[in-house]
Image (tube, rainbow, N blue to C red):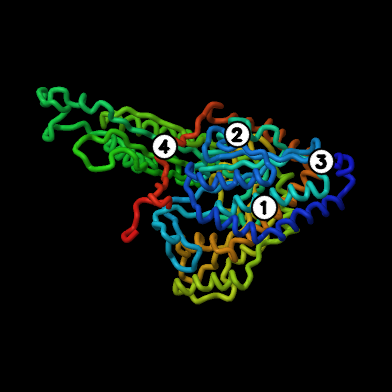
Amino acid sequence: MTLSSTELDAGPALTAATKATAQQWIDDNMGKLSLWHKHIWDLAEPAWREYKSAQWYVDLLRLEGFTVESGSASMPTAFSAEWSFGDGGPVLLTYAEYDAVPGNCQSAGTERSPREGLSPYAPGHTDPHSALGISTLAGLLGTKHAMAVHGIAGTLKYTGEPAEKVQGSKVVHGLRGYYDGVDAIVSFHPFYMLPLCNTARWDTQCGSYYSKVYTFVCDEPETWQLSANPNSPIPASHSAARAPGANVALMSMYTSTRIMQDAMLPSFGGWSLSDAIFTQGQATADNLPAGIAQIQYSWRCPTLEMAEHVLTVLDRNAEHAAAMAHCRLETTWVARNRPGRTNHALAEALYANLEQVGAPQYGPEAIAAAQRIQKTLGVEPMAKPFLDECEALISPQDAEAALREHLAPWQKNWTSDDYVEMTHYAPTVRFYVSRPALKPAPGQGAYPGWVMNALGGIAATIDPTIEVAGKTIAGTFVDLLTRPELVAAAKSEFDIRVAQDPMPALLPLDFMPPTEFAWPDYALAPDGERVWYPKVAGQ
């Protein structure tokens, strides 16, 4: 039997009991969740190449009774899963991410070393998205179990979102309608900056993110100097002047953009520009002009107006670089995201559940691991090695006030993450739970990057993140399933915000994800093992 909305409205005791059941499921399955996390953490596949990670989620969700579409929205490593119980009820969505970052291969240990058998240039989880996915999976499955036990009607949707590091999937899922008809979305990320730790975002959501690939193609090098060596059987002899080629175009683009960066936007507002040179094209230094070269630019801005101005400069630089080097230019969008919309109704509801669960706490095994890292780095081991903020809560309003101290009064958005696209399709709350971070020693500065990467793979230090985030998601979902007035309030606020600031999608509905590019990838050795290049000596 499933319960009607009237029965649910009259049953706060049922809400509490359903939350307890969902959260108890997480307690009972923490050992399994921890092993699942270690599996995804060890796979550590980079953006658009998360073959094994995505398939693991698809197989597991099907075993759990979900209907799963693999390769959703034309993205080979994406998926969309759905499970319903009873008739009616709200439609709730959360999601997994599972992409890792090239060049960050780190073992789950207390010294700097790559995972066994891998190059240090292989990918590793930095944020870690492995914990993001298993945390939301914990909340999803705990809620599913409680719905069945207590007869609560509703639908749970779960999307697999690849390539977050290039913010690639959510804009595509949104354009293809995968968020349509959803009543509420819960977006989680392990904390990565203070004061947004063990809290929910309030007014200042993430801003816009644009990412574009510029491809320079020199496909007619023989037309560069028509009068040279007219009797030669090849387009140019070894001593002839050659077309500059694609590498020259790329370097012209790179250097001119670096030179122009200070002239793009004022140096305030928290904007940034990043670049990456793709490795396809010529594999060796031959005496022919390079036929193709590609560079990706990504920029984060508080406003769309600022993002568009950077785009204008980049496009102009690319056009002139191509012309100088006897190339033609192709451009391809990777992502083009709108700034996020807030939802106070959902933020308050979620934070109430986070308060009920409490901040992560680190036990003796976690403390011992942290102290061993400090000793390795020549830091006197501390009795309480983790940041105080990691084990404390901060309300959304207090976090907002602390954040605003560092921002200009006009600035409504800061940093970037592609959850912002979801906020334009349904009421969405974004929240953060602490991941293990060490307390700096006086005068020592920040810890090396490998430290947080390693702590993200040690079960004793990362499991508290998964437990707290999973229970918070489950509690919030139960509130939404059993309190129709909360769903209505979130929807009303969403409609008002959309009406006040309409913001159409920035890419066409038929936009295709750029999975065909030479994104960092691994090869398979004859024995089936993964090989990452460049390899290190002795491998």
Residue ID for mark 2? 174
Q: Is residue 49 above or below residue 499?
A: below
Mark-to-mark CA distance, 2 and 1: 24 Å
Residue ID for mark 3? 484
**Closer mark to the observer between disc 3 and disc 4:** 4
Q: Is residue 480 left or right of residue 306?
A: right
Determine the secondary structure under disc 4: loop
Q: Which residue is pictured at 62% across the width and 38% down the height?
A: 80
Residue 70 placement: quadrant? top right
- Contact between marks 4 and 1 (CB within 8 A): the answer is no
Where's the N terminus, which quadrant?
A: top right
Residue 377's x, y, as percent?
45, 71
Mark-to-mark CA distance, 4 and 1: 33 Å
Q: Which amino acid does the dot numbered 4 rest on?
A: Phe
Q: Earlier in the sequence, mark 3 or mark 2?
A: 2
For label 2, count other residues whose C-alpha is less than 10 Å away and answer few (under 14), some (14-19) or many (20+).
some
Q: Which amino acid does the dot numbered 1 rest on?
A: Ala
Q: Earlier in the sequence, mark 2 or mark 1?
A: 1
Residue ID for mark 4? 517
